[in-house]
Image (cartoon, helix red, strand yellow):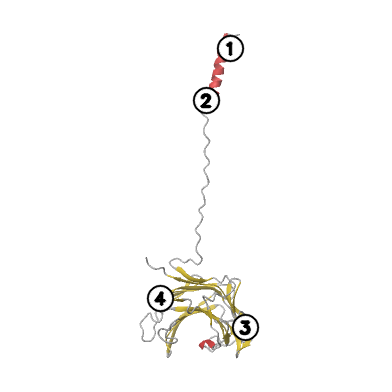
Amino acid sequence: MNLKKIILVPILCILISLIGCSSELFQPEPTATPLPTATPIPTATPVGYIEDWELVWQDEFDGTEIDLEKWSHEVNGKGGGNQELQYYTDFPENSRVENGNLVIEAREERYIGRDYTSARLRTLGKGDWKYGRFEANIRLPEGQGIWPAFWMLPTAWRYGGWPTSGEIDIMELVGHLPGRTHHTLHYGSLGNHIYTGDHFDLPAGEKFIDDFHVFAIEWEETEMRWYIDGELVQTQNKWETKNHPFPAPFDQEFHIILNLAVGGNWPGSPNATTEFPQRMEVDYVRVYQRPASE
């Protein structure tokens, strides 16, 4: 055997062995794949949450019946002081919970001397508040002589009879103007009835019967602000009542009223164009107050 081969072959074997060992000894570690960042679970926003206000009372109408621990029916045919034509009943045909909504239904039918029936619900003695934010999500009816309202009256009538103790109209609609709502305060005295407010119009061609809208008022000690679907539409900060300084009469507890009137001095009577039944549908009513200072 050639002497060079005898020397080179062992050397080559040693080199190959070293290279193999080196590749095993110095094999780079694989780069670690980072674990995906966990997506934080969002904190659920409470139903009805509004910043700077605390929800203190609500009716979502999720049951099967009107909650009589929160509402009472006014049953009478007195005409509401406005020469209205309906008889207010507590019959389910006129007020009920249906598909998650309070339904107040005006019907053309003869009952105890009246040609129409309907319903008027109030929270008197079950929900009475001094100051707060009051809101309801409502779909309104339409038609000549139809008059739905979401409003408030004093609980104790501290300053005397209407209008001296005040009235807060969060929303009213007269059915021959189905795209307009009215927002008014009443005060003064019987011989000097004062009412101040304004109206709100939907864009041309739209009507409040087409969809639900959120009507709200923020009532504070020296100011009231009206909102529709979150938009500020009116502010009032001046009012008075006989022989009592501002902010009377709106410095006492009031309660909520929901009703659907037929006829009366303002809207006039139904006519041949008015269709019955007419429905006022209320998705919810919520009341908020400012949180107590710590």
Q: Which residue is mark 1?
A: 5
Distance of label 1 from label 2 (alpha carbons):
25 Å
**Mark 3 or 1: the one toward you:** 3
Distance of label 3 from label 2 (alpha carbons):
96 Å
- At 55% across and 24% down in the image, what residue appears? 20
Distance of label 3 from label 1 (alpha carbons):
118 Å
Badges 3 and 1: C-beta atoms under 8 Å apart?
no
**Mark 4 or 3: the one toward you:** 3
Q: Earlier in the sequence, mark 4 or mark 3?
A: 3
Badges 3 and 2: C-beta atoms under 8 Å apart?
no
Q: Which residue is mark 3?
A: 107
Q: Which residue is mark 2?
A: 22
Q: Earlier in the sequence, mark 2 or mark 4?
A: 2
Can you give x and y, in whole percent of width and height, for residue 265 in the image?
Answer: 53, 88
**Three-letter amino acid code of the residue under disc 4:** Glu
**Mark 3 or 2: the one toward you:** 3
Please name whichever residue, 24 or 70, is drawn nearer the observer in this view of the structure.
70
